[in-house]
Image (cartoon, rainbow, N blue to C red):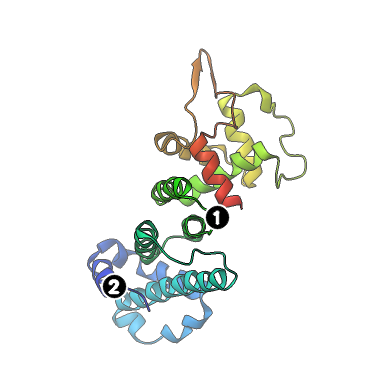
Amino acid sequence: MVLGFESLTGSYMENSEVKKTTNNVVDLGLSILPELSGLLTPDLVTDPVSVTVKVLSKIVENKLINFYSEWRERKKDQRTKDDLESIHVDSLADTLTFIQGNPDEERFNAVKKLFFKLIEPNTNNAEQLAVFELMQICKKLTSNDILVLVGAFEIFEKKNLPGNFALGLNLNSRHRNIWFASIAQKLGHNINSLVEFSEPHLIELKLISPIEERSPLLYFPEEKFRLTDSGFKLCQILAA
């Protein structure tokens, strides 16, 4: 079921980091996939790396099943193009390779949404090119990056905001620290530094605008809560 997984597992087995974290990976796999309890055999002690590979293989296989199941449902509902062009085939190959890398749920769901947007019947040629490029960018994002982006988008759109949101925060001030604090509050963890951690990467990928320096304070541009046109378009697709 998992395309090319044998070659993928070879690199895992040679990787000392996997050997070092084998027990943690096995525990994670077993905790989120109860059906993997059959892997609790003597091999777990005698050959833990092999067991880890089996766990990873099962997780990836489940993601591929999820992907193909949704595709079948969309095709049945006529929410996909009848004929796939070269850009769709290239995107499919990229997406399957990405899934085989075992992305976490945030990254998996984001790339999956972009792929299905690409093959929607009403996505024209110009939009296809834009979505394809956004897919390439999205694959470079961490789950924290995605959460920060979506948090900024929902604040701008005033969607899914918690009660007493931004209490004590002046969002109109456009100060950098307010941006951190409001998104951290929106995400529910209230850890400003987690939002700040993703800021340089999102600026580098041109998904949010850089800060304007106005000594002694730092401000962000007066636009879509720092989202660039690319960042805003990406969030619109993820929110659809």
Q: Which three-letter amino acid code belongs to the residue tagged 1?
A: Asn
Near mark 2 (Cα within 10 A), the count class, few <14, some 14-19 or many ≥20, is few
Task: First in sequence, mark 1 or 2: give its number.
Answer: 2
Residue 71 or 2: which is nearer the viewer? 71
Q: Position of residue 13 (x, y in %)?
A: 25, 70
Q: Where, by quadrant of the figure, is residue 103 drawn?
A: bottom left
Residue 31 or 46: which is nearer the viewer? 31
**To which residue does mark 2 refer?**
4
Q: Is residue 153 left or right of residue 159?
A: left
Q: Residue at x 48, y 47 (%)?
A: 127
Q: Which three-letter amino acid code belongs to the residue tagged 2?
A: Gly
Q: What distance separates the C-alpha of mark 1 from that of mark 2?
A: 33 Å
Quadrant containing the N terminus in the rendered view: bottom left
Residue 158 or 51: which is nearer the viewer? 158
Q: Residue at x 51, y 39 (%)?
A: 231
The answer to whether residue 124 of the structure is visible from this angle is: yes
Tag shown at residue 122: 1
The answer to whether residue 27 of the structure is visible from this angle is: no
Q: Position of residue 227 (x, y in %)?
A: 54, 35
Q: Position of residue 151 (x, y in %)?
A: 60, 43
Q: Is residue 89 above or below residue 174?
A: below
Q: Residue at x 57, y 73 (%)?
A: 76
Q: Is residue 25 above or below residue 204?
A: below
Q: Residue at x 22, y 67 (%)?
A: 14
- How many marks on residues? 2
Q: Are marks 1 and 2 in contact (CB under 8 Å)?
A: no
Q: Where, by quadrant of the figure, is residue 18 drawn?
A: bottom left
